[in-house]
Image (cartoon, coloured by chain):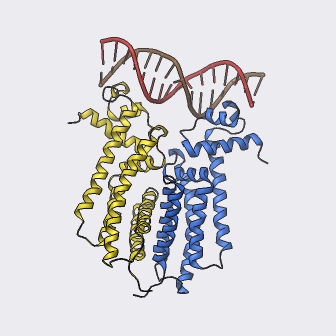
Chain colours: A blue, B yellow, C brown, D red
Amino acid sequence: MIPLSKDTILQSALYLFSRKGYEGTSLSELADRSGMRKASIYSHFKNKEAVFWAVIDRAFEEETEKLSSLLTETAEESFQERLNRIIDLHVDFYKQNDEKANLWRRMTLFPPEAFQDRLQNKLMEYEQQCNALLEQEMNRAIKAGEIAAIDANTGIAMVLCMVDGLFMEYSYYTEEEFDKRVQAVKQMTWRAFMPVQR
Amino acid sequence: MIPLSKDTILQSALYLFSRKGYEGTSLSELADRSGMRKASIYSHFKNKEAVFWAVIDRAFEEETEKLSSLLTETAEESFQERLNRIIDLHVDFYKQNDEKANLWRRMTLFPPEAFQDRLQNKLMEYEQQCNALLEQEMNRAIKAGEIAAIDANTGIAMVLCMVDGLFMEYSYYTEEEFDKRVQAVKQMTWRAFMPVQR
DNA sequence: CCTACCGATCGGTAGG
DNA sequence: CCTACCGATCGGTAGG
């Protein structure tokens, strides 16, 4: 459906934008990597900005889709299982989509100035979905006595903070060290939620 | 001690590097902001790279100093207090040194390619100190029965992950929303550590 | 601290 | 998809 050479440009752009950022990637690098001359990129995209949005829109679509499938597919599972699932969804994303995860990291923290607002909107949409999944699940688990009676927003804030922390840490620890951290985080997160006698 | 105009360049460079990154900052911008011509920067620094390391070295020195004072000053306090202190040390840093914190964020995740190794070393030094403080304190608190008998490395991993998560979140939430998250994180972190009967 | 300049590279266009 | 080109800007230097 998408012409071969256009798709090649998009793949090369994902690679380069994730490693060098938008401003740090030149159209001639992009052309080299795509096996054509710089000017030829303009037969597929209006300008550099259009390449950017094509890459970003595609990446966001794929991830929001994954999250909403998780939402429907795991409706029957326990809180602890579902909690681990949402952590794993993110951890697997960091591990298996190295380039896309790194692009996400860049766009969250250091968006190109001119694109900041439009990117912020896209990120908020994603976070809303994540929040909804967790809130619904948390309230259900509290009622069932499966976890302690914590304020749902407090619990959600903590889970998302752990996910964000792992997100950062993945890019500067070795894979072995990172896996230890994921285990530690799951264990301690569950300790924070489990019901206790006081 | 440091000549006025040299210090002005360093301040401007911190401002610009934190907002636009190293490669994204041009020497002419830096000159404009410092109230001089581009060529004049070369009377104070050998080249752009030398400006970079002057900014970075200064920022790291200040932060490692703060951490080691905390280590000695709070020796008498309880685990929960000291845990909150180390979270606050970082949160206050994000809030009160906006530019420096943002520079730190950039250098952790997206270091300029050529400087990556030297930066990694500096960051590891800092993390070692943080680790040492927490490990010593955690083992003491476990022995005293003040917290549950968790593996120290597991506990440390969780605290650092929360701090890293807040680090990311500070740059994309409003201050009000962020403060709520800090409170939530402190509360849930303590729940994960407190001793329980099972 | 300045003016005046260097070669290299940037994003983008003309015209085919 | 190409060759050939544009004005603007980059980091850095000469010489004062």
Whole-percent x, y for residue B57 in the image: 33, 42
The quadrant holding residue A78 is bottom right
Whole-percent x, y for residue B105 in the image: 43, 51
Q: Residue at x 55, y 82 (%)?
A: A141
Q: Nearer the viewer, residue B88 or B77?
A: B77
Whole-percent x, y for residue A110 in the image: 49, 48
Q: Residue at x 28, y 73 (%)?
A: B78
Q: In screen coordinates, is B172 left or right of A94?
A: left
The residue most toward the right is A1
The quadrant holding residue B137 is bottom left
Q: Is residue B87 above or below residue B9?
A: below
In this rendering, does residue A152 appear at all?
yes
Q: Nearer the viewer, residue B103 or B29?
A: B103
Q: Is residue A142 above or below residue B111?
A: below
Q: Residue at x 64, y 48 (%)?
A: A55
In this rendering, does residue B20 appear at all?
no
- Look at the image and tell me in which quarter the C terminus of chain B lies: bottom left
Q: Is residue A9 above or below residue A122?
A: above
Count every numbered label the image shows and give the total.
0
- Look at the image and tell me in which quarter the N terminus of chain B lies: top left
Q: In screen coordinates, is B97 left or right of B111?
A: left
Q: Nearer the viewer, residue B58 or B98?
A: B58
Whole-percent x, y for residue A167 in the image: 52, 58
Q: Residue at x 58, y 44 (%)?
A: A17
